Every structure is written in structure tokens, then in C-alpha cells.
Image (spheres, rainbow, N blue to C red):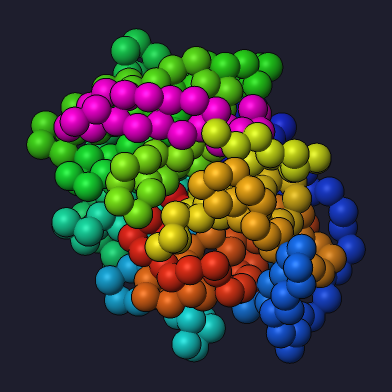
Amino acid sequence: MKRRAIAVPVLLAGVLAGCTEAGDLSSVPSTATASGVTAKRVLQVTEVHEATGMTLLEGPTFGPDGSLYVVDVTAPPGAGKVLRIDLDEESVEQVWTDDSSALTSAQFHSDDGRLYVTDFLSGSIRSMTAEGQDVRDVVTGPIDGIPMQPDDIAFGEDGALYVTDAAGAQDPYWEATGRIVRVDPSTGAPTVLASELPSPNGIAFSPDHGELWVSLNTGNRIDRLTLAEGGAEVATAFPAIHASPGIGQLDSIAVDADGNLYVGLHSRPEILVYDTSGALLQTVTMTGEGVSSATNVAIQPGTSVAYATVSGPDGGFLYSFEAQAAGIPQSTGG
């Protein structure tokens, strides 16, 4: 889910690893051990698209209506690129599509109630209503002369939008050319907060907005940033958590009410849960053949029920597990 159009399939190649059928886990309860938990499969959301040879769910976020919205990064023209899941009925409906985008994240803004999505291919951030209407460009075009490749987004306490940006990375895509960009809530002007990062991906604020956590996909680490007053400049920044995901790569981040970090993995169907001291609290495993990535998490607000977007050669799925603490607005992983 990471590079420019010519390189996106390279990063998604792990999604195609393994071609056996997935088992039916609908009746398997979540079980906890001292070292980890096994998540429960809730439903299948998408099939593998014949036109693209894959499906990749991302951006789970709860809408004002209580439904869970997700995006399908590799959906072809005409197929659902924004999807709405009714968790009570376990049903899926298409909200929005177009002919050219590759959406990598979604977030609802608490101020205007609109859904914000990132288009990795065009370099744009757009907003729309929860029904997929009135689509508007929020940011588009180069920033400081460099085309943007936006991945995940988070909203500051003042409504400012913060986005991780691969910033024109090509082959080799692991070069440290990525950025963090802030979009001013009043003027809509984008500014670069940080640069020369190895493929920044996930981004989420702590419960009190005092810390900004950023996962680095090809750096396998999570950086901790604090912002100066007004949020327009970085005050401090350093690598806070170093991960060892093996064949996986760090993907999106969600934060619960206690500040714990839920970090998705690309090319490995697991979620890593860390506390702010860097301790690995839990590994959440998505069992069943035919799944190879667990890229993102949303914890339902006011509950401790977490939902993970999981994909692989058998399709795109939604899994659930018990989070360490309750969901808050920062509990949607971009």
C-alpha cells in the first residue's frame, strides 16, 4: 500500500503469498493467553478483484451513524472504494467509487462530520459526506515542489489534519524520503512538519493530544513527536519503539483511552499492542488460511471491542478482539 503507482504492486506482493482456502472461524471465540490472543472472524467484506488480482482493506473508522467504514486500496473502477459495514446486520454496502483512485485511509472529522480519504495515486486528500456525496479536494498537487503520496491521517485537537506522506518515493522505495504534513484548519494550507523519514505510514495522537505517534513502514520503528504550541512545528522527536516483525512491515496505528498503541502489520496477519514505555503487551493473531496482512484497527467508541481489517489471497475480512481499553476518537487507525 505504499508506493507510487509503478511500485504499489511491489509492496503488496505479500498479500498474494499463499493460495489455500480460509477456514470458517465464525464460531471460534476470542481466547487470551499470557502472550497473545486469537481474534474472531466477523465477516468477509470483499472478494479478490479479477481486474487487480487482489483486495486490500484499510482505514476502518466509525461514522456518525455507528457503522464502520473501510476503504479497499486495490478496488478497480466501479467496485466499492469506500464501503460501509453494518455490524449488527453483518452487511456491506458500497458508498463511493471512481475510475482512478487508490484510497489508503479514511477518517471522520468531528467538526464537520465529513469523511476524509487519502488517494495514494493522485496525491490528493478528499472529503465527502457519509453517503459518498459532495466530494471535495482538500489538498492536491505538490507540496514544496514534491508530489505528495498520502497514506494515513489524524486530526489534531484544533481540527488540523496531519498526514503521513511517502513524498515521491520510487525504486528503491525504502529510501528515507517520507514526510509528515500538516493541513491548517483555517486556511487549508499544507506545511511539512518532518522529512527524510523511511516510509511513514500510521499516525495517531495520544488521548490528550500531547504526543503524536508515527510508524515507519520500512524503518520498523515508531517515532514519538511532540508539537509546539499551535501544532504547526515539531518540538521534539525521537525513535520510541523498535519492532521486530520479521517478514511483516509496520502499518497503521490506533490508540486507546489508556494510550496503548495498536500497530497493524503488512505481510503478516497480526496486530502488535504496545504501551507507551515500549513494552509489547500483546500480539493479536488472525488465524485461518488465506489471510496475510492485518493492516489497521478501529476500537468502537465507548467500548473495548476492536475491529481489524485483514486481507489476503482469499479476500478482505473483518476480525474482532478485546482491546486493552476503551475506544476514543484516536482509536481509528487512519
User: Residue 288: which quarter of the image?
Assistant: bottom right
Residue 227 within the segment the image draws in magenta: yes
> Where is residue 299 shown, x and y percent of the image?
47, 67
Residue 313 within the segment the image draws in magenta: no
For the N terminus, the image quarter is top right
> Where is residue 6 shown, x and y percent of the image?
62, 26
> In this rendering, is residue 193 above or below 325?
above
Count of numbered circles in the view: 0
- Residue at the farthest front position: 277
At a point 65% along the width and 21% down the height, the residue shown is: 174
> In this rendering, is residue 174 above or below 103?
above
Front residue of this view, candidates 201 and 227: 227
- Residue at the farthest left position: 186
Front residue of this view, candidates 326 and 331: 326
At a point 35% along the width and 54% down the height, the residue shown is: 207
At a point 59% along the width and 61% down the height, the residue shown is: 309
At a point 76% along the width and 68% down the height, the residue shown is: 34
Front residue of this view, candidates 288 and 160: 160
> Where is residue 191 shown, x and y percent of the image?
27, 22
> In this rendering, is residue 197 above or below 305?
above
Q: Which residues are magenta?
A: 216-239
